[in-house]
Every structure is written in C-alpha cells, then in structure tokens.
Amino acid sequence: METLAVVLDQPEQIALRALPLTTPGAADVVIRTEWSGVSTGTERLLWDGRMPAFPGMGYPLVPGYETVGTVVDAGRDAGRRVGERVFVPGARCYQGAHGLFGGAASTLVTAGSRTVPASPALGEGGALLALAATAYHAAWGSGGAAPQLIVGHGALGRLLARLCATLGAAPPVVWETNAARRGGADGYAVIDPADDPRRDYAVICDCSGDAGLLDSLVGRCARGAEIVLAGFYTGAVAFDFVPAFLREVRLRVSAEWQPADLEAVARLANEGRLPLDGIVTHRGSPRDPRSAYATAFGDPACVKMILDWREAA
C-alpha cells in the first residue's frame, strides 16, 4: 500500500509525496484520514529545525499527531470495526521517512489500541483531542489542581479553560498579550497581563512556551503556589531564586499526555460535555502544505490550522 503524506525533507522544505506503508498486522487498523491538525508547538520546532533530539528523530519525516479518520480495514485483534470514526495520535507506518509523529497522511496504519472513538458530530474538532488531553494532563491527569491563571489564549489555553468549566472548577483568568486572540472566550475573562492587579494566584498554568515569563509569574503567586509549565521550552528555564524562595513556590513540568488522559477527554467530547468548536480558525489543503504550515506558524490570527484530506487522495 501507499499513502500521500506531508514530508519534511529538512527544515522549511515540505512537500506532499507518495510513501510506501508498512503491512498491517492482526492488531492494526488502516485509517482513511479526513482531517489532521498542525501543532504550533512541537511541529513548529520540526519546521524550523530547533526540535531537540528525540528517539526516532530525523529527516525526512512525516509530522502530525492530531488525526481524525475512518477505519477502512481492521485486523482480528485490533479492537476496532470497519466504518468507525477514530482519533489517531500519529503513526509510524512509513517506508522512506521517519514517523516521529506521523499523522499527516491520507492513509495510516497503526495499532487499534492507539486509537480512540471520535463521534462524527465532532467533525474536524475531533483533531483537537490530543491538545485536550495535554490540557487535561496539566491539571487533573497528573494529580494537580485546576488553574486559577492560564497564560496564553491559543488552542491549548482555550481547551484548558473549557475543561475548567466542564469539570466544575472556578472560571480561570487567561492572559493574552495579542489583542487578536482575546476573543472566543465563553464564561471566563481574557485580559492583557498589564491590566491584571492580582498577586495571589495559587495555581498558574503557562501554556505559552515562553521561558522568559517565569519571573513575572513568580511575582503573581500566593505563598505556596504552584506554577505548571505546560508549554514546550527549547532552552534553559531559569528564574530569580529569592522571590520564589520568599513565596515558597513549587514548579511542575507537565509532560506528554498519557492514554488515560486521551480516553478521559474523548469521553467528555463524545458525550457533548467538552465543546471543541470555535478553536479551528484556518483550514488548508495538504496539496499545498507549504502555505498551510507557513500560515500556522506565521499568522498571529491563526489559533489552529487543520488540513482537510477528504479530497486529497
């Protein structure tokens, strides 16, 4: 079998190419992709060559870990059925390219156990389940508390704020310096940090990935507060010790979501309790990946870019 896949041959060199697929086994499913998302965190680092070394990392590679599609073939041990709509957090099924993430392709082969059901009612929003799982893991999934302050009103920050409402937490305050991104809030306030007088937050979750903000966040903490680093930081993370010492601040790194996190948010979304609409702002064609990725990484108004694969094959 072959698939059409978005391939990064090297940083900033991207194309749609046919790649041979590995042969599916008894525990695998074959999925026809409908939509895949472009991550402005990790995929941006792959795009510009700043991604730190990871096992399996190398060019050429197929990016993407936010895919929704339909099962078109299922092995006897796959646990899925033909015709089922599923979310796929990437795949490693290619010959001739690394699949460090591997979700941006028209056809995928992966273990059925790696997929979760995605209701047809979710549409393209189903591609947001990995980000929702990341947001969930930053608080509830790793035993933490709901944030009182969220830094950044991108897709991750929006999903974290929506999870607060879904799970019965108090509405958080969200900081956003880009005025174009302050819209789209429902039941919570999005403000410029300069307009926020508070200095007593007990839980702050940074979704921005900006390590330079840490000192300013420490200054907004109550004594014994926790700062959760939920973004992806490419360099050293440093802070002034004395202010953190005086407040006895705790720092926690929120790592990659776990399968239980994905299952939790998929259940909430499929039941209609976690809304995923209104976060996708831009849509692109996989036949012109350079334009789509350039927009995703370069247009400040782009909260989330989705590739529509339904007519790409």
Image: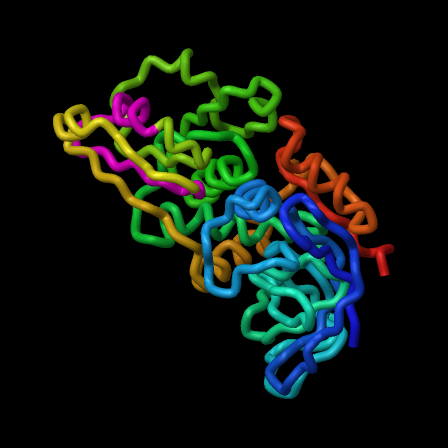
Quadrant where the C terminus is found in the figure: bottom right
Name the residue rendered at 26%, 21% in the picture.
Answer: 219
The residue sitting at the left extreme is 246
Q: Nearer the viewer, residue 47 or 168?
A: 47
Picture quadrant where residue 114 is located? bottom right
- The segment highlighted magenta reads 214-232
Q: Is residue 171 visible?
A: no
Report the number of discs.
0
Name the residue rendered at 33%, 13% in the picture.
Answer: 197
**Rendering coords of residue 92 (x, y %):** 60, 69
Magenta segment: does it hold 220? yes
Q: Is residue 244 left or right of 160 when viewed as pictured?
A: left
Q: Is residue 213 visible?
A: yes
Quadrant where the N terminus is found in the figure: bottom right
Q: Is residue 25 above or below residue 84?
A: below
Picture quadrant where residue 252 is located? top left
**Rendering coords of residue 246 (x, y %):** 13, 26
**Rendering coords of residue 290 (x, y %):** 75, 43
Name the residue rendered at 51%, 44% in the picture.
Answer: 50
Name the residue rendered at 45%, 24% in the picture.
Answer: 175
**Rendering coords of residue 186 (x, y %):** 55, 29
The color scheme shown is rainbow
Magenta segment: does it hold 14? no
Q: Is residue 120 left or right of 243 when viewed as pictured?
A: right
